[in-house]
Amino acid sequence: MAKKGMMSPAERREAVVAVLRKDEPMSVLARRYGVSDTTLAKWRDDFLAAGEAALNYGRNNPVEGVARENLQLRRDLAEREQVIGELTVANRILKKKQDGLL
């Protein structure tokens, strides 16, 4: 079997499905596919996360759902950054006031 960098998506899927079916212990499957247990576990986790995303956002266009979630997370981050900035300014003003500079 090919090394991890050379495995096709179909081969990776086959390995992950074997892990999920619990055909054999993960360490045995990892050796068979020429990857580490950690790599195989990461593939499994990524596979399950992608499946969950497809279920959450609809089967027809899971990419669009992920893009929507990404946009919402970016908006939330921007809002938090603005609040942090406002609090930083207020904190500086209070420190100057306390030091008698204002």
Image (cartoon, helix red, strand yellow):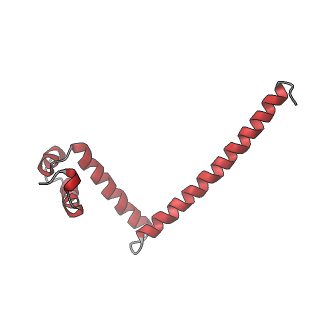
Q: Quadrant of residue 7?
A: bottom left
Horizontal side of residue 74 vs 2, given as left or right: right
Q: Residue furthest bottom?
A: 60
Q: Is residue 53 above or below residue 44?
A: below
Question: In x, y percent, where is residue 50?
Answer: 36, 61
Horizontal side of residue 68 vs 86, given as left or right: left
Comparing 1 with 53, the one in front is: 1
Horizontal side of residue 76 vs 89, given as left or right: left
Q: Is residue 12 above or below residue 85?
A: below
Comparing 27 with 20, the one in front is: 27
Q: Residue at x 20, y 55 (%)?
A: 6
Q: Residue at x 24, y 62 (%)?
A: 9
Horizontal side of residue 41 vs 83, given as left or right: left
Quarter of the image that includes the C terminus:
top right
Q: Residue furthest front?
A: 6
Question: In x, y percent, where is residue 74?
Answer: 57, 56
Q: Is residue 35 above or below residue 10?
A: above
Q: Residue at x 40, y 75 (%)?
A: 60
Q: How many marks?
A: 0
Q: Residue at x 46, y 69 (%)?
A: 64
Quarter of the image that includes the N terminus:
bottom left
Question: In x, y percent, where is residue 46?
Answer: 33, 55
